[in-house]
Image (tube, grey):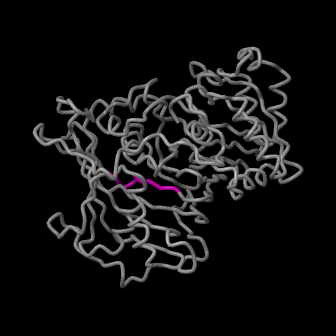
Amino acid sequence: MDPLDSIQQSGHYGAMQMLSRFLRMPVLLLAACGWHLAQAQTAVVIGGNLRFDNDAVWQRIVDEAGGPGKAKVAVLATASAAPEQSANAIVQVLQRHGAQAEHIPVAPRLEGADLQKNLNDPALIAKVRGASAVFFSGGAQGLIVDTFQPGGKPTAMLEAIWEVYRRGGVVAGTSAGAAIMSRTMFRDALDVMGVMRGQMRDGHEIDRGLGFVSDRLFVDQHFLKRGRIGRMLPLMMAQGYRLGLGIEENSAAVIRGPSVDIIGARGALLVDLRSARTDPTLDMFNVQNARLSYLDNGDHYDLRTGQVTPEQRKTPLPETRIIRASHSLTSPVSTFQTDILGDNRIVQAMAELMTAPSGEVRAMAARVRPGATEPRDRTAFVFRLYRGEGTQGWFNSQGDANDITLLDVRLDVRPVPVPLAAPPRLAANNPPPQPAEAPVGAAAEPSATPR
């Protein structure tokens, strides 16, 4: 079966602009001088639902932290609803991969523990400082920032974590532990459509992260499974980010200075807004000329140059199959998807675009709650994906049909009203994505809600 056919079959904006005052920092064009992280510092950002049998990710953490027999990992299940259970499971799998791993008992929901005493315990702080890696579990990311950075002020234990990182250590995190990696994070924004419609309040939907990755990079998790392209774009526009990386479940981005490696079961979506623009006459989120790239297991990205290096076994999709067609809005549309925020739908649309005769694919994000009457609550969004000069597909003809790389797909998003008389309905086989349960064999991530 053709690799592209297979993946297709598988499965008040003005108010938001005001949010840019929150944690806004100057945004520069990506350049060599702009990425200040030392080459040795490594962040392993995991998209959640990391399985215990995902050797590529677990072993990479251990290897980056010094290798078997040398790696010392401090495990923090601060976000978890069941901290001891989560931490013990993570410690065991790290030990199986050759690390010395230890649970640091600092978690608001740890039964029988004094949170403030443990958080400020010199012995525990020394253990963290002596580690070569720190691992944050999944759960509720708000618990992590509230514990280690209350009111925006770092605790002594957070300073110890930063010491590990600055001297060339590893900071890894899955799900909630990945959400805290940027300077800004989603705190509690499970309603993707709510964010698109402008629901993005400081301390509620968004908050300060811990900022281990570059100030100019935003990361998100559970990305393709939960259709989080819909919440990443508005946040990036409001906060001034120009580059975003949405990591899928059971996958990771290993960020070492300007170098990004994608590893694990799936991949990550790279969102580039450096050439994007918005229509200020619209009072709702909108964007034109965003650029999307899907990076798969084994692909490499350079933050300084913007260069993507596909995994060595992949070959370019022949130019004869990427039909260079008109991008006019009046050209024939090859397809229209009913729910672009469904499981993996954005990548499916990107893959279909590669051979779409019209040169574009359109889709809708149109979830309306029953009884909604306010115009804002009845706003849908049209996604238009189209090919540009640099659009290219790569695939592995010898491997999995889903083993693909899709580069430089253009995206426009615009709001459209939904008539009261005809609320859109999702197909029965395509319900809105729900928070996913951890699969059998996955790292324990008992949710304290968000993620």
Name the residue: 57% across, 60% down: 302
User: In the image, residue 148 lies at what x, y percent?
Assistant: 65, 25
Name the residue: 10% across, 39% down: 421
Nearer to me, 10 or 347: 10
Quarter of the image for the N terminus: give it. Answer: bottom left
Tell me if residue 274 is in the magenta stretch: yes
Using residue 325 as the reference point, say whether residue 313 is left or right of it.
Answer: right
User: In the image, residue 9 lies at what x, y percent?
Assistant: 39, 66
Task: Report which quarter residue 147 is drawn in.
Answer: top right
Name the residue: 77% across, 29% down: 104
Name the residue: 59% across, 59% down: 265
Tell me if residue 175 is in the magenta stretch: no
Classify 40 as above or below 180: below
User: In the image, residue 84 lies at what x, y percent?
Assistant: 73, 29
Using residue 422 as the reference point, say whether residue 51 is left or right of it.
Answer: right
Residue range of the region highlighted in magenta in the rendering: 268-276
